[in-house]
Image: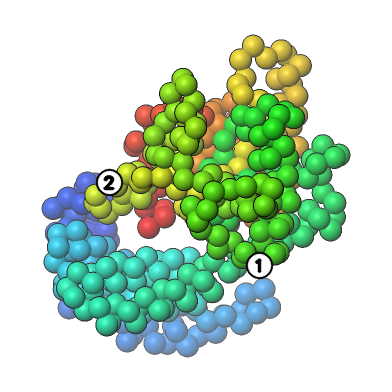
Amino acid sequence: MKDNIHCYQDLFEALQHCKSGSEEEFQIYKKMVELIESEAEISELEDDLSTDVIDDDKVIYAIPCILDDYAAPFDNLASLYMSRGEYEKAIELFQKALPLYRTLEINNKDYTYQRYYAMQKLVECLCNIGNNELALYYKFELKYLKRYVIDLPKLHRIKQLLLDLKERNITLDGTNRPFIGYGNPNADILIVGKECTHNMGDEDYKKFYEPNFNHWYETVFCGHECSYRSGVEPYTFEAGNFHPINPYYKLINKKQSKNKEIGRPGPTHYYYQKLVEKIRNYNGHQYIKSEFIDFFNDCFITEMCEICRPNDKNLTKEQHEEIESNIRERLDWMRKTNFFNQFKVVILACGPHYAKAIKNDEVLRTDLFGDAYIVYCNQLSRWDKSLEIKIPDIQRNLY
């Protein structure tokens, strides 16, 4: 077994030096799987699986991390076969990876996501070969996983956030409760912008920004359960059908010109959409541009600063100091919640000055966002080309 372990480690190190999706990567994963299937003795791990260990006065079962060394090559090679259209070979490998992920997630819930995404790809493969009956069985499990294992715990977190704000009467400036944000609270991606571009006190500010807490409270506690689908009908604030999960009705996926056409997104939301579409293009899937703005399905959006303004040109020294003070207060509030640390990827699309404290303070960064993968970029009123080289790492952390 020792020789096999060394061989496996050599192959693993070789992976770090080859291009994702390349023939070289494909051949390395094939060798890893061949090694596992011909030599590895999973049955030898039986004693480890039955061993109790004590952690914080609780008995947990020791799940050997080495199982991930079996699951990952199966999963990754299956994905490569899938991209080549060899669906039957992919199915066989996905079916070997799934029970390993199921064992690993007993001790580490992160593996629930690995199992979920592997099962999604398995369903796609089954549909491609016409085995719709077996695909249907897996779809039922996927629906259960998504609703009760992945989404529900996160939904509880935003409920707790709202209850804390209400019951403790938490405010940021002594009058209004903090701005929470927009989008899918069950998403894996958090995007943090600079500040909302409304003018303080104008009509849009009073509709979209100021009542943000009330919009969330009514959505979460009045039966919607964060399942509202955008585009069902146009929003009418008077009728009370505005929803913070997807706050715009059927915006065409085309950037506004200087004429600011109605029915199109502003530049920041247009580039949020572009970023999310590029992230969705994982494992070699064809890039698909959505007809309408729908990035809110994949993201939760919040802001670094509570002070709304259309732009930050020609600000006085006092205004800059006010911004810095507001950011400190807002970060202090965010780090005390158990909501913003739930995301797998955090994109700080607010420029280096606004994100300076987070980038320079590891403790603050961890308090705010847990172990999320952090991406720093400019405010996306225009496309930031630095994101192009970061997207593969974002995809790896998500999928």
Instruction: Depth check: give the residue in front, 266 or 263.
Output: 263
- Which residue is rendered at x = 43% and y = 23% of the image? 257
- Which residue is rendered at x = 28% and y = 71% of the image? 122
Q: Earlier in the sequence, mark 2 or mark 1?
A: 1
Instruction: Depth check: give the residue in front, 341 or 125.
Output: 125
Using a 10 Å C-alpha cutoff, classify the residue at mark 1 as few (fewer than 14 neighbours), some (14 to 19) or many (20 or more).
few
**Is residue 362 among the parts visible in the rendering?**
no
Q: Position of residue 176 (x, y in %)?
A: 80, 41
| Image quarter hosting the C terminus | bottom left
**Is residue 306 among the parts visible in the rendering?**
yes
334 sits to left or right of 120: right
| Image quarter hosting the N terminus | bottom left
Q: Position of residue 189 (x, y in %)?
A: 49, 50
Instruction: Depth check: give the residue in front, 129 or 107.
Output: 129
Q: Position of residue 394 (x, y in %)?
A: 40, 47
Task: Give the label on residue 223, or none.
Answer: 1
Q: Secondary structure at mark 2?
A: loop
- Which residue is rendered at x = 55% and y = 84% of the image? 52
Image height of 369 relative to 133, above or below: above
Mark nearest the camera among 2 and 1 is 1
**C-alpha gap between disc 2 and disc 1:** 36 Å
Residue position marked by numbered label 2 in the rendering: 287
**Residue type beneath disc 1:** Gly
